[in-house]
Image (spheres, rainbow, N blue to C red):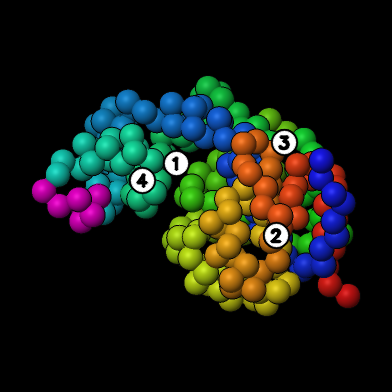
Amino acid sequence: MSVPRSFRADAALIDIEGTISPTAFVRETLFGYSRGRIAQYVKAKAGDSEVEAILAETRELAPGLDPVEALDDWQARDVKAAPLKALQGLIWESGYVSGAFTSPIFPDALEALRRWRAAGVRLYVYSSGSRHAQNLFFRHNEAGDLRRLFSDFFDTGVGPKTERGSYFAIGRTIGTAPDAILFLSDSAAELRAAESAGLQVAQAVKEASLAEMRWAAVADFSAIDVAPRP
């Protein structure tokens, strides 16, 4: 059971998978949709400048390998490589647009995000999925288009989520001191990195995450209050 906890923060930085949305949606629905479609998509988009740029970056990261085979291998091993994330976003877009799926969000998380935003807290997303994929997730959501809730989206272009420098970079970008930012994630490794950069942190334990006593555990977002600093 979550213990009610109040935070004073001017900005909240939110993870997606396992935090405000079920892990299965990404691991099974999205990955399942893109699995086996990479070669088909690349062939259909031959000559497309965005796809060609992805292939060129893949060749740089996997020299001597066929880029499509490299992308397939990365996806099978869940390698968080930038060109794979970019291509997955494009493939997922076709699925969203076709109506093959919509993205889910935990109802208590959505209510809390709306409450925090109404209180004046700026909301940001930091996910390993590309910014494009994040926009798709919130645009094609079962609760409607949620993009207006958020001030900006960050991916691993600012750095890995397990490195403290990434959180310094986000703080500088949004013009907010680290101690005025609350970071919510289900990942202990990410929370440790954010905490080491001076951010306030809370751990989502919506699914199989093991709560660590050092942080506030969020099983029900209704138990968490976030408001701007005085």
- How packed mark 3 is, by other alpha carbons closer than 10 Å (few <14, some 14-19, many 20 or more), is some
Q: Position of residue 2 (x, y in %)?
A: 81, 45
Residue receiving disc 4: 79
On the rendered image, what quadrant is the N terminus found in?
top right
What's the residue type where badge 2 is placed? Answer: Arg
- Chain-order first, disc 1 or disc 3: 1
What's the residue type where badge 3 is placed? Answer: Phe
Q: Position of residue 35 (x, y in %)?
A: 36, 28
Q: Which mark is in front, 1 or 3?
A: 3
Residue receiving disc 1: 89
Magenta residues (range):
58-64
- Residue at image location 58% in from the left, 62% down from the top: 192
Residue receiving disc 2: 214
- Chain-order first, disc 2 or disc 1: 1
For residue 73, above or below residue 117: above
- How packed mark 2 is, by other alpha carbons closer than 10 Å (few <14, some 14-19, many 20 or more), is few
SS for dot 1: helix
Residue furthest to the left: 64
Magenta segment includes 88:
no
Residue receiving disc 3: 106
In which image quadrant can residue 38 be found? Answer: top left
Q: Which mark is in front, 4 or 2?
A: 2
